[in-house]
Amino acid sequence: MHGLGDVRFFDRIAPLYDRVMPPADGEALAAGLAHATRPIDRLLDVGGGSGRAAAALAGPEITVVDASVGMLTRAREHRDRAAVAGDAGRLPFRDGSVDAATVVDAFHHLPDQRAAIEEAARVIAPGGALVVREFDPAHPLGRALVASEHAVGMASRFRTPGDLADALADAGFDPRIVDRGFAYTVVGVRE
């Protein structure tokens, strides 16, 4: 059910998603974005679904990018966010056209994680930041989350903070692990 199957799942649960999910951690996202060495005026919320993470941020112009049209409808109609249907592995934006990107609680759903990181490196201008907020599969709660997502038919692929930092480095980012725990934040600054 990975990839397009996950998209169908999120299309189905879109009307309920914001009722059952807690707000995104705006402080953790702001702390990650603070690593950028350029001003952040334009930000992409990749895999941003209903705009939950975008709602936790203030300041930049934010565009939510997601493959689930149902979730994007929520971002537009309930959060008044710019929203673009797109694949994280083929972002519909020009090279160096944004100052930052976030991927919040969604990276494990991306079918081609390497392509998503490379696309973020392509669209983020030098000095900009990619902030990934994810769940650690090595944490006890992370193991439970992995099992529950697989039980409902998702083939989610979770990464530890160190593994994700290494993947960001391979794509030309200067990675930093900003915080650890069940939820963690890894930032890559575009060199």
Image (cartoon, rainbow, N blue to C red):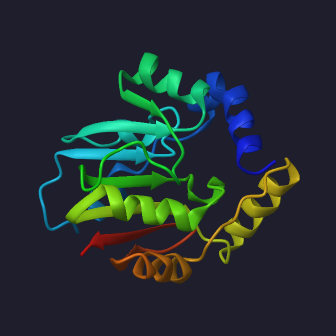
The answer to whether residue 115 of the structure is visible from this angle is: yes
Q: Which residue is depicted at the point 44% across and 81% down?
A: 170
User: Residue 60: horizontal and vertical position, in percent?
Assistant: 20, 42
In the rendered picture of this protein, how many numbered marks are placed on residues? 0
Q: Which residue is depicted at the point 45% across and 39% down?
A: 65
Q: Which residue is depicted at the point 35% across and 53% down?
A: 101
User: Residue 20: horizontal and vertical position, in percent?
Assistant: 63, 34
In the displayed structure image, the side of residue 146 where residue 58 appears, left or right: left
Quadrant assignment, res 130: bottom left
Farthest residue to the top: give it: 77
Is 100 in front, or is 88? 88
User: Residue 134: horizontal and vertical position, in percent?
Assistant: 54, 62
The answer to whether residue 34 of the structure is visible from this angle is: no
Quadrant assignment, res 38: bottom left
In the image, residue 124 sits, relative to residue 138, either above or below, namely above
In the displayed structure image, the side of residue 17 where residue 99 appears, left or right: left
Q: Which residue is depicted at the point 24% across and 75% down?
A: 191
In the image, residue 173 sits, relative to residue 38, either above or below, namely below
User: Residue 172: horizontal and vertical position, in percent?
Assistant: 35, 78
Is 26 in front, or is 170? 170
In the displayed structure image, the side of residue 167 where residue 4 appears, left or right: right
In the image, residue 145 sits, relative to residue 136, either above or below, namely above
